[in-house]
Image (spheres, coloured by chain):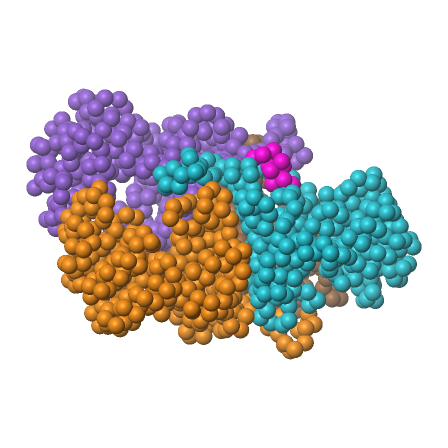
Chain colours: A cyan, B orange, C purple, D brown
């Protein structure tokens, strides 16, 4: 498979490195910036350099976009129209309308379309998904995520589009149900983009998801709590080992129709930190893309998932612009 | 000073113990429940037992209410009308209307009215306030609080009225400015009261405060982040020592009107965990009440503070009932 | 059972409180110091006060010593000679010779003799013992303990006699084998007693135990590592919950007679924090004493255990005085 | 400067990479193993490959040895005899005799001789040294180091020679005084080399240093406590940030000639985590070597330091072989 990486800034070189490590993979690459193209050529002497995006498209069978968000739709459309499989760096595109157009295009051409939601390919998220599928957590009650740190300010977007795609993607993958509505609020303290924000996503049956994303926090926290009515999970990505802890804890109501305190009890059992698959997530993601492109099967982070994440992002942005109003996802369907 | 404690359930005995420890303080106590009155008499042989609230009122100069929230207004009103100074366990009362009535009554009679917002009297909160007053944190950007645990479900109220008074009180005390609006949402997973909730409080100049309160979390977290534009604070109440950490960290914009990445830089200096006064907070609170009752000066957690906290609670409850609508605090003024 | 507590300093009141909580237990108490006797009478109005130790002995069936170490042997001997069951606060006595005399006396009179090695009665140590008994850890390889903090300096003894009894007792209880030799060294930085020390205990088959005790450390650490060839344990007593973590980790040698690197592999499985019994250890200890006195069975922390701990302490002290020489425990038998 | 790296196993490539990054540095490299030479050539196309050590010596001005310990003396001797500056991977050589011979040779030829004790060049160790030099810690009381983990077993040496050079080097650099004696003990559980060991180093004036090194621990700990009589330090290398914490804590004796408890008090002030220089330690180390080779000045981890570390290692090994006997360092002088 000949694969072309467009964009050699922060993330592109990681894609080059990982695609190069796959057997039978020829890597091409390009960037608008002459300096970055030259640096890429020095760093990856075995990769082919294309002078521009058109030249890249001509020489490859699949394209990976690691360019700024605002270019994803246009570059992606050209790739699909040229009959190339398409991998897009997160966030996917700027709106559900754009997402649907690319998805329809990929479908009509029988091409693989996938978004690099890398976290879905980590050992931790895969293990939580396995626990949920096996019924270990029981009914999901809530998903609570905190991803905060000092920096790195993005200049073309706010903290929601920068950090929340990770957690919205994890949440969507784990809950596996359709979101109903989104609310968001935030603060702008340094320039016109929000540097911290809170997002709430509402689902049926009182399932609620909440996200705190923040570029101006003094400490680095990346922690997700997942409450089920059988067990609960803490996924702390800052832990060097034991990132995942499963708590056999819960609430027991003897007669839930009554509400006196004596009938509520708390169950506490063992905590377990399951061993996680240590494979590099990016390697798994790249393999998923190559395999889907080769076989035609739907990728884990494929169109349906990417569309749901994009709709939540768009709804969060809309809520943010409208004073924190609750935005029903059906509003975005027109 | 003769002080009467009404309510000998969970918190009342702590008040008895602390008032007894003050020199010149005679403690009286009562409870509606015969068993609790008898247990109180065994545990505190030196305290006087009153058969009921009326008898208590007759015998004392000041009253402390450690009864359920729903009784605070009525019992408080009777105490003030009888000319007794009044200390009320948090949360104060159920609405701003009730709060204003008690406050007006206390003022007209020249009596001390105070709410036991204990956290204001901890070494940690007092130190943060000192840092803010000295300008060490600079302009406040955000206040983010997480108070989660498994249990203890309250039966007459939801998690907001149970846990959020602590954090709203801390936030109000530290920011020292008037809140503008409140938004809240939550989930009910076991019976009719919310067991988890998120509250956002909006202030002027992009200052934003956010609160996560949760009765069904697998781990106990009590952590507050406070972002200032000079320094930032992490207050982790679960730490056995070094509860407070002050980070000399921040963002520097060389030319804030421009937005190119190269002009944003991040400053990282020392972290410092200041030594905290280890006096028991409850002892300080009790002394504050006695001193204010004796001198007539306004208590730290007096009427103005208690009213602001009550208004935020009421606005949060209203928002919760109305689909997470942003509730302006001016709406509560009628 | 009538039980008399001698010594109302730091630990004695805990014994009074716990014995009082046992059904059918009448508590008597005394202290050499008039002030402490008076304070005890105020704090425990239901307990009987004896004017001195002789009077105490006359009125009770069993005695608990919470007096300074140097008095244990003499007071214990008098209690046993008077036909009283005997519970001694740790450390037991000052030498193996003293220990053997008291043990022989108790045996000849058919009396219960027990040392308050409280840690053996904690949920954590009981769980580790259970894991070891079930073969979960496999063959024990090492026991490594760190117990350090700032203060509280003892005046009549060094840090070994103050802190190490806890860890030597836990180690002896868990390993369940006879120690062979002891080495110790330390430092005296403030006055004539060591304020920090390291002790090593040697067993058969390369089992090794090591203890770091320290009164002048800036942080409080109470952590024990136990290495088995099947699983390993970390027991961190400073953790508010999950004090015990069991790691399914180990080393696999494919052909142990060969030593090439490719044949060594490392096994990593789940970590598990088993739920621990939350009963107060002191309550369990007190019940053990009462039950053994009533039934005549041997206590968990009875003569055999207490003697082994005393011998290790005496050997450590001897090693410390002789430049860290390895002291064989057989040397103490004469 | 033309620099030749011998040994392209685990550490050698790090040296190649860092020397290549220095301006004006031409890197040559070799390895006994054909496969490793070929892999090195692929990975570092800009470096020159030498067929063997003799060829390497001919082409360079300085040599860095990243070969197994047993070869250091012989390869180092040949380099110095050939007039090449010499950098040796830790541990330096197998005995003080070998160390002295190489040092004398370097001196007689006017060549730079330095050992890669990388930790001395970290921001953390440099900051502690600065604090000590400024008198911030006061008189040093103890140095306590724990470096434990699961794996990586070395096949030609025990855990002391593998892990302890790091901590002995840090300790020697920070204390800056001559060690008097060494004691060591350990356990062999898998094959003929110790997989865990404890080392104690004795200095004048009750200064004591202790080291726990362990290949078979379930958790990774790299923590050093340093007690001074003014302040104390915790250096935790596993912390992602705030690796260094300085505690303003101590013991105050009002009348040190008396020993009653009331005269001992404990001082607790702020804790401070100073900002650390984030430069890569290896880069600093490499620059130090190049600069010393160019100017002739003595390196930080030069002959005197390297000899002291080697003597402590040799004494520890001797003690280990002789039942934990206290080995005076003067014994090694013959």
Is residue A194 in view from this perspective? yes
Residue B333: percent from left, percent from top: 42, 69
Quarter of the image for residue C277 reads top left
Task: Please report the residue visible at 34 percent of the width from the left and 67 percent of the height from the top.
Answer: B100
Inspect the magenta stretch and tell me whether residue A330 lies in it: no
Residue C120: percent from left, percent from top: 34, 34
Drawn side of residue C275 relative to residue C308, left or right: right
Nearer-the-camera pick, D62 or A107: A107
Task: Please report the residue visible at 14 percent of the width from the left and 58 percent of the height from the top.
Answer: B59
- In the image, residue C286 sits, relative to residue B131, either above or below, namely above
Residue B39: percent from left, percent from top: 21, 43
Is residue B275 in view from this perspective? no
Nearer-the-camera pick, C259 or C172: C172
Which residues are drawn in magenta? A125-136
- In the image, residue C192 sits, relative to residue D154, either above or below, namely below
Quarter of the image for residue A191 reads bottom right
Drawn side of residue D28 relative to residue D239, left or right: right
Drawn side of residue A237 relative to residue B51, left or right: right
Q: Main secondary structure of the magenta part?
A: helix
Nearer-the-camera pick, C127 or D155: C127
Where does the N terminus of chain B fall, quadrant-wise? bottom left
Where does the C terminus of chain B fall, quadrant-wise? bottom left
- In the image, residue B24 sits, relative to residue A86, either above or below, namely below
Quarter of the image for residue D288 reads bottom right
Task: Please report the residue visible at 28 percent of the width from the left and 33 percent of the height from the top.
Answer: C285
């Amino acid at each position: 498979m000949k694969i072309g990486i467009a964009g050699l800034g922060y993330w592109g070189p990681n894609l080059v490195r990982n695609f190069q490590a796959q057997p039978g993979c020829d890597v091409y690459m390009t960037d608008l910036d002459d300096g970055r193209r030259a640096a890429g050529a020095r760093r990856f002497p075995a990769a082919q350099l294309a002078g521009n995006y058109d030249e890249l498209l001509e020489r490859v069978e699949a394209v990976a976009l690691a360019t700024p968000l605002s270019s994803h739709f246009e570059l992606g459309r050209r790739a699909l129209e040229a009959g190339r499989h398409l991998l897009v760096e997160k966030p996917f595109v700027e709106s559900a309308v754009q997402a649907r157009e690319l998805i329809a295009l990929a479908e009509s051409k029988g091409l693989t379309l996938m978004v690099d939601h890398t976290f879905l390919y980590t050992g931790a998220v895969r293990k939580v998904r396995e626990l949920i599928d096996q019924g270990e957590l029981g009914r999901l009650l809530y998903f609570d995520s905190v991803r905060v740190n000092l920096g790195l300010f993005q200049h073309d977007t706010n903290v929601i589009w920068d950090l929340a795609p990770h957690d919205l993607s994890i949440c969507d993958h784990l809950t596996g149900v359709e979101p109903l509505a989104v609310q968001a609020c935030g603060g702008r303290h340094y320039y016109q983009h929000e540097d911290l924000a809170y997002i709430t996503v509402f689902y049926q049956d009182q399932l609620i998801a909440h996200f705190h994303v923040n570029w101006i926090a003094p400490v680095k926290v990346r922690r997700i709590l997942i409450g089920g009515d059988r067990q609960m999970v803490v996924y702390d990505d800052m832990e060097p080992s034991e990132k995942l802890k499963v708590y056999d804890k819960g609430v027991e109501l003897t007669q839930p129709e009554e509400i006196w305190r004596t009938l509520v009890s708390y169950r506490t059992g063992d905590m377990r930190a399951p061993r996680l698959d240590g494979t590099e997530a990016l390697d798994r993601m790249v393999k998923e893309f190559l395999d889907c492109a080769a076989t035609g099967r739907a990728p884990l982070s494929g169109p349906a998932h990417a569309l749901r994440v994009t709709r939540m992002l768009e709804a969060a942005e809309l809520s943010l612009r409208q004073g924190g109003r609750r935005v029903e996802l059906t509003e975005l369907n027109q």
